Image (tube, grey):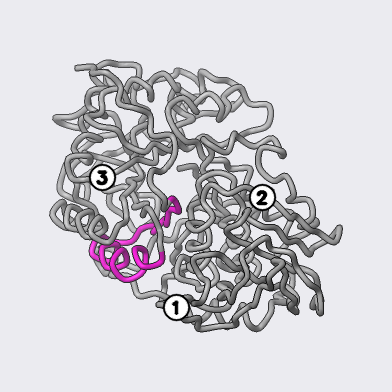
Amino acid sequence: MHRRRLRPAIVALAVIAGLLAPGVVTAPPAAAAPSGGKKVIANLFEWNWPSVAGECSSTLGPKGYGYVQVSPPQEHVRGNQWWVAYQPVSYRIESRKGTRAQFKSMVDTCHAAGVKVIVDAVINHMSGQDNGGTGWAGSTYQHHVYPGIYQSQDFHYCGRNGNNDIANYNDRYEVQNCELVNLSDLKTESDYVRSRLAAYLNDLLSLGVDGFRLDASKHMPAADIANIRSRLNRSAYIVQEVIYGAGEPITPNEYTGNGDVHEFRYGKDLARVFRSERLAYLRNFGEGWGHLPSAVSSVFVDNHDTQRDDGGVLTYRDRGIYALANAFMLAWPYGSPTVMSSYTFSSRDAGPPSDGSNKTRNTVCYSGWECEHRWPVIANMVGFRNATEGAGVSNWYDNGNNHIAFSRTGRGFITINDEGSAINGRSYYTGLPAGRYCDVIHGTFTNGTCSGPVVTVDANGWFAANVPAHDAIALHLNARLP
């Protein structure tokens, strides 16, 4: 958590139509990448537990998502803003998103659908309410006192800046010992605090959780996170929120020994390329741009923080161009991709659709909930990612500007035309076996049939096609017609 030019919508009609249809123990092995063949994560931000369960069964499992990331499940402060979930008051699994029993049922249902569960875990801090109060499930608290959990000695008091807040991100001590926007900062070097945090994570593991997104990881030394991880009862996928800042002393690279790390530069760089630069520049996107090593990088076009920040990323409001950027992310073999699923918001603090008591309503896609993970272009490209996992890039083509194409060697092929006009009559070398393939940008492949255009690859691996402006074509072996 961090609280701190749209171009004209000239988007191919085919793409738009698709969008709108839409005690310390030995450390367990580090799970430094999602396991199994299905690695795409869907971040169902602020969905309640019954809705997540239903989505695992109806969409995430069938579409091939490997993981669902859910918002913080612990008891939190009261309010209707999105960020109340990031202000814990206890570690009871009861929040505006549902009860412990509903959470457990959700995990079991997702597992039955073949989808693993990642929890957004808030372990750097507790609440930011100076006057204290009563939490969602009835627990009383004060800013630095949480009865039965923490007392005043369990928090940092950095003694700077008057209000104890971080003021200088070039000062390592401040970033990791002062308060992030008044949030009571836990003394994670303390053995007691470490044991208490590990107990919370182990409780979630006992409910079947498969991994954790560790919120505000930058505000904890990597060694503190390593110690907490060493206390887990079993292996779990770990991804850490460490926001890169140019010239800052704390860097994402420090945290890679604990697991994956969010690569925040990825979304901003991708947005800049799609908005105002050239897709041809993407030929070495990722490590070639100074990003983290692919094996430990967690990437996204946007997430719940960046879509509320300074406009430096693409979001659901960008519609067709957002879909194309996600298609590129899912086609390009760098990092572990997360697809954002948002609710509609017009103010930065706005919470999810809720009832009069601020309890999160059941999700109804395209009615207050954006559900980008269901947009056909994005959902179908999850299958592309699964089909091409482990294959390298070959047959790169670009026109020096905004028309690119590349193969995932022997398994898939994509061409993206982000020019202002169609590319007509061009032939593309795919390296794929001869056959008829479903274009998964415009159609869904199910039971050997395609709901959209079919592309014929000849015996030499070529096909010819017209690609409209701001559109794409994608083929893969698992969408080959009989």
Between residues 313 and 404, which one lies in front from this camera angle?
404
Sequence order check: which comes first, mark 2 or mark 3? 3
Which residue is found at the position 51% from the left and 70% from the top? 479
Question: Residue 147 falls in which quadrant of the image?
Answer: top left
Sequence order check: which comes first, mark 2 or mark 1? 2
Residue on which disc 3 sits: 209
Query: Magenta part of the protein: which range?
Result: 39-63
Between residues 294 and 428, which one lies in front from this camera angle?
428
Q: Quadrant of the N terminus?
A: top left
Residue 60 part of the magenta segment: yes
Residue 81 part of the magenta segment: no
SS at mark 2?
strand
Residue 448 is tagged as 1
Q: Is residue 388 visible?
A: yes
Badge 1 crowding class, 10 Å Cα cut-off, few under 14, some 14 to 19, many 20 or more, is: few
Residue 393 is tagged as 2
Which residue is found at the position 45% from the left and 70% from the top? 374
Q: Is 480 situated left or right of 230 in this image?
A: right
| Count of numbered badges drawn on the protein | 3
